[in-house]
Amino acid sequence: MTAIDDLFSRLKASGKKALMPFITAGDPNLPFTAKVLSRLQELGCSMAEVGIPYSDPIADGPVIQASYTRALANKVKLDHIFHQIADTKRSLSMPLVSMVSYAIIHRHGPARYIEAAKDAGFSGAIVPDLLVEESAQFAKLCREHDFNLVQLVTPTTPQDRALKIAEQSSGFLYFVSVTGITGERTQLPDGLVDRVGWLRERTKLPICIGFGISKPEHVRLLSPVCDGLIVGSAIVRCLEKANESEANAIASASELVSSLLAALDS
Amino acid sequence: MSTVTPNANAASSEAIRQVPDAQGRFGQFGGRYVPETLTRALEELTQEYAKAKQDPDFQAELNELLHRFVGRPSPLYHAARLSKQLGGAQIWLKREDLNHTGAHKINNTLGQALLTLRMKKTRVIAETGAGQHGVASATACAHFGLPCVVYMGAEDVRRQKPNVFSMRLMGAEVRPVESGSRTLRDAVNEAMRDWMSSVEHTHYIIGSVIGPHPFPMMVRDFQSVIGRECREQCLSSFGKLPDTIVACVGGGSNAAGMFYPFVEDRSVRMVGVEAGGRGAAPGDHASPLTYGFPGVLHGSYSYVMQDEDGQTSDVHSMSAGLDYPGVGPEHSYWKDASRVEYTSCRDDEALGAFDFLARNEGILTALETCHAVAKATEIAKTMSPDQHLVICLSGRGDKDAAELARLRGQEW
Ligand SMILES: Cc1ncc(COP(=O)(O)O)c(C=O)c1O
C-alpha cells in the first residue's frame, strides 16, 4: 500500500475529493519547486504531481512545454530533482507522483528509476507515453517495489479497453478529459460526466480527471463523479514569471488553488 | 569518414524479412510509445492498411498513380563516366530524383493519401525537414482534394525555401515551428501535438520509417517499390544482383525501401550512410546508428542521440533531411543483426560529392543524397570494374541551390 492508496482510502472514508496540482520540477529552479510544494500543502491540496522536464513532450501544450524548456535551459537533471524532493519531502506529508516520459525511465533503467524515485519520496509515476500494451514489464517492477503506475484513459479509448487499462492501473486512474494536449480550456467536452460515470460504476480504483481544468465551475461540475481533479497548465502559467518575482508567482498560484479548493468543498 | 568493415557476420536468422511482429517489433526495436489518445487511430490505421495490402483494387490504384502520375519505374542509370573516373566498380544510380516532385517521398505519400480516403478522414498533416516530404504530401493532397498542413522547423523553412514556396503553390499550409532546435525533430513534435487534438478526422502522413507502429512497417512497404524495381533492373541490365548498395539514412525511408527487397540476398552488401556533420563530437553530427544508443523517441524504440538523462540531444547536419536525432527501428534491427553496415559522412565530404556528380554526370543531387554518393565513391574505388554498385539517388538538388551558394559565400 502506497501513500497514494492510503490517501484515497482516507478521502473516501470522509467523503472528500482530492485537488492535485501539477508543477514542473526546476521551473525556474529546484528551491522554488520546493517552496511551491510546501505552499500547496499548506493551502490544503491532497497531493501533487511533479513533472520531470522532457525535451520532446508530445502530450503537452505550449504552457507546460515552455516550463520544461525553462527548466532544461537551467540544466536541471533527474538526480538533482530527486535530491531536492528527498530534502523537501521530509517536511511534506502529502503524497507526490512523478509525471515522466518513458524515454527518461528507459535511459536510467526502469528498476533504477523506481528505486531512486521511491527513495526521494515519490509514491508512483504517470508515464504518458507508456501504453498498457508496452507496460507489462514496468508494471511488474512497480508492483514489486510497491510503487504506483498510474495509467491513462482518454476520450478516444474504447470502453472495453478502458476497463482493461483500469485493471492495470494502480494508485488511481487518470481520466483525460479532452482529445488533445494539456492546456486550459474554457469549456470541457459534452458527455464527460457521463463517460467518467460509466467507468466509475465499473472500477474500484479512484478516478482523477485532468487536462484543461482551470476554473471553479469545472471543479463543481466534475467533482461529484470522480475522486480527484488534476490542474496543470493553469498553475504552471501562474508560476511562469517566477524569475521576475517569486512572491508574485506564488501569490497568483495560491489564489487560483484556493478558488479551486473552495469549489471542491462547496 | 568512419571506416566500413566488411559484412562478415551477417545475421543468421532466415526470418529477417518477417518483421515486424504484431506489436510492431523489429527484434527488440519499434513498438508504440505514444499517448493513449492516439492508440485508437493507430489501431484503425493498422487494420485498414492490412486490408488495403490484400486488396487488388487498392494496389492497382496505387500502381497506376505511381506509373502515370509519378513516372515510375524510375530508371536504373549506368554512370559510366563516373565509374571510369573512379576506376573501380560499375556505378548505377537508381533515379528517384526523376520522380514527380523530385524525390522518393512521393511513393509513400500517395499510398498514405489513399489510406486517408479509405479511412474517411478529411484532413492531412505532415512534418518535413528538407521539404521533400512536405512537397510530396502537398502534391498527394492536391491530387485528391484533401486539405494539408505541413509542420516545418523554422531553420528548415529558411534553408529549403523553394520547397516551402512549392507547397504553398499547391494549396498546403506551411506552419513554421519555432520551438527547440527549429528542425525536423521539432516539426515531428508539433505534428504529433496537432494529431493529439485532430486524430478523429485527420491522418498524419509520417514521412519516414519512424514513429509508432504501423508507420515504420507501412512506410517501408510503400518505399519498397524502389528496391523491387531495382532488383529487376539489375537482373535485366547486368544479369545479376548488385554487389553493393548504398543509400543515405535520415529517418531511413529511402534506404529501407531500397534495402528491404534485398535483405535475404546475402551476397548483396548494403551500406547506410548517416550525416556526419562537422565531426564525431556530440552535437556536431546526426548519426544515431554510428554514435547513439537504443532509446525512445517519437513513438518508437530505436537508436537515438540522447544525453545521460534521456533528453534528446541537439544534432547537426547541413542537410535538413538528415538533421534528425533518431532513426527508423528496422535500421536498428538490421544494424544489430549485422545485415546492413552503417557509417557516416561529413558535410564537407558530401559537398565534394555534389560537385563530383554535377561535373562528371550532369546531375544536381540533393544534399541528403550526396552523403550516399560520397561514401559510395569511396567504396567503389576498392572494388573491381566487373563488380556493380548501386546508389539510391533519393532526390534532386534544385532545392539546395540557394543554400549551397550561402554555404560557399557565393551569390545566388
Ligand atoms: C532527397 C532526400 N533523401 C533522403 C532524405 C532522408 O529521409 P529518409 O532517410 O527517410 O529517406 C530526405 C528527407 O527529407 C530527402 O529529401
Image (cartoon, coloured by chain):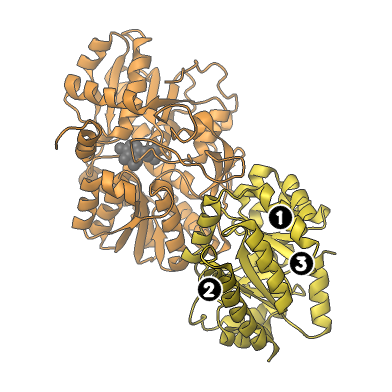
Q: Residue at x 28, y 23 (%)?
A: B353
Residue in front for this viewpoint, A221 or B93 = A221
Q: Colour of chain B?
A: orange
**Are both tags, 2 and 3, on one chain?**
yes
Q: Position of residue A70 (x, y in %)?
A: 52, 56
What amino acid is labelled 2 in the image? Val
Task: Report the Cα–Cα distance between label 2 and label 1.
Answer: 33 Å
Residue in front for this viewpoint, A115 or A151 = A115
| Crowd rating for badge 1 (residues with CA inside 10 Å; few <14, some 14–19, many 20+) | some
Q: Residue at x 25, y 33 (%)?
A: B407
The chain containing the residue under callout 3 comes to A
Badge 3 is on which residue?
Answer: A95
**Are both tags, 2 and 1, on one chain?**
yes
Mark found first going from the N terminus, 2 or 1: 1
Badge 1 is on which residue?
Answer: A84
Chain coloured yellow here: A
Vertical order, B3 against A57 (above or below): above
Q: Position of residue A197 (x, y in %)?
A: 66, 82
Residue B302 is at least partly visible in this image: yes
Badge 2 is on which residue?
Answer: A178
Residue in front for this viewpoint, A169 or B277 = B277
Q: Position of residue B295 (x, y in %)?
A: 58, 42
In what element is the residue under mark 3?
A: loop
Task: Report the Cα–Cα distance between label 1 and label 3.
Answer: 15 Å
| Crowd rating for badge 2 (residues with CA inside 10 Å; few <14, some 14–19, many 20+) | many
Mark found first going from the N terminus, 1 or 3: 1
Side of B296 relative to B147 (left or right): right
What amino acid is labelled 1 in the image? Gln
Ligand 1 is found in the corner quadrant, namely top left
